[in-house]
Image: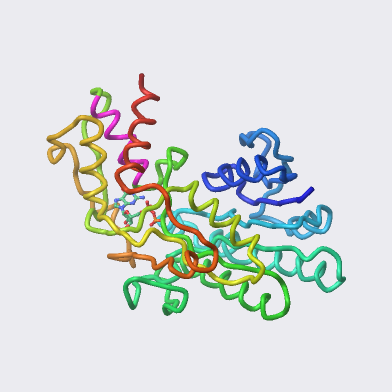
Amino acid sequence: MTRALITGVTGQDGSYLAELLLAQGYEVHGVTRDADEVVTAGVVPHELDLATGSAIAELIADIEPNEIYNLAALSSVYQSWQNPGLTARLNGAVVAEMLAAVKVIHDRGAVDIRFVQASSAEIFGAPTESPQNEQTVIRPTSPYGAAKAYAHGLVGAYRTAGVAASSVILYNHESPRRPETFVTRKITAAAARISVGKQETLELGNMDAQRDWGWAPDYAHALLKTARHSEPDDFVIATGISHSVRDFVAAAFTRAGVEDWSERVRVSDGLLRSGDAALQLGDASKAHRILDWSPTVKFDEIVAAMVDHDLALLS
Ligand code: GDP
């Protein structure tokens, strides 16, 4: 039986990936911060606070998984400005500890662990070219992006040293499992509440920012395909189509049945971010060519699924 270890197993991506691996007959181990977190049924939970200590190395040595998916992170760019030290630890130093533990097992000639790092479009900061690909200059503009860039570099270094490590540069990917700290879910939850009279207005930051939004379960498939591919490598995972936050707002309110949304949405300067990329757009042609990966859900379908979910929660 193939054994996988997922950090961040209770998050959006971790839960979709766990379901996918369990359905394929894997033995799935998951790292959780505390016992209160809801873990996908069938996953073997391991309670461990990655913010302190280095118990993750011992866990890897104990389990000797065939595949490791490192999805744990401080996941919000906004919050990384409030907690840069914790961001450096969770999104950076922990990856070093994990790769070092994998290398020990590799050097012993035991299991050849496939390590997949969830990297991010934020490593490109305000990108120097559009669309971005695996060769685009890495120049982060947030503590989140800087820590992810360090981890991305580490994966390359350990790959050169013989470890089967890959870094998957994920563009934004959404689903009803997104928390409201992300703009998409914040918008769909608000549009649903406003449509039934439970909320008056929605405050947002930069509505002109453009993001390449994909469907989270598609991205879980990309992680799995990366682990399975014979050659460890780096891959951009994106849809190749971007929309503005304003486009997302319009689509969500329309879906919720609120046509005159302009009176309902306000821009708050307090929600603007330093270093916020004006436009992110990914070129996933390498993943398409080598992994046979393609996105399957379009922008309007993503918005509809999220709004419908939030409407259902209210009824
Ligand atoms: P991120 O790209 O991983 O940071 O994902 P987010 O969903 O948090 O942000 C996506 C874009 O939406 C960024 O350009 C934000 O600046 C922009 N944005 C505009 N208003 C808001 C808001 O109220 N909350 C969040 N989270 N993002 C916002």
Above or below, 66 relative to 17: below
Residue shown at 69% from the left, 57% from the top:
68
Residue 140 image point, x, y percent:
43, 72
Above or below, 196 relative to 77: above
Magenta region: 184-195
Question: Is residue 145 one of those drawn in magenta?
Answer: no
Above or below, 101 relative to 248: below
**Which secondary structure dominates the residues rendered in magenta?**
helix
Q: Is residue 280 left or right of residue 28?
A: left
Residue 282 image point, x, y percent:
38, 66
Residue 147 image point, x, y percent:
53, 67
Residue 119 image point, x, y percent:
52, 64
Question: Is residue 188 one of those drawn in magenta?
Answer: yes
Closer to us: 82 or 166:
166
The colour scheme is rainbow
Above or below, 186 relative to 157: above
Residue shown at 38% from the left, 72% from the top:
132
Residue shown at 36% from the left, 53% from the top:
213
Quarter residue 274 falls in? bottom left
Residue at the outermost top position: 315
Quarter residue 164 falls in? bottom right
Q: Split into 4 quadrants, where in the image is the C terminus?
A: top left
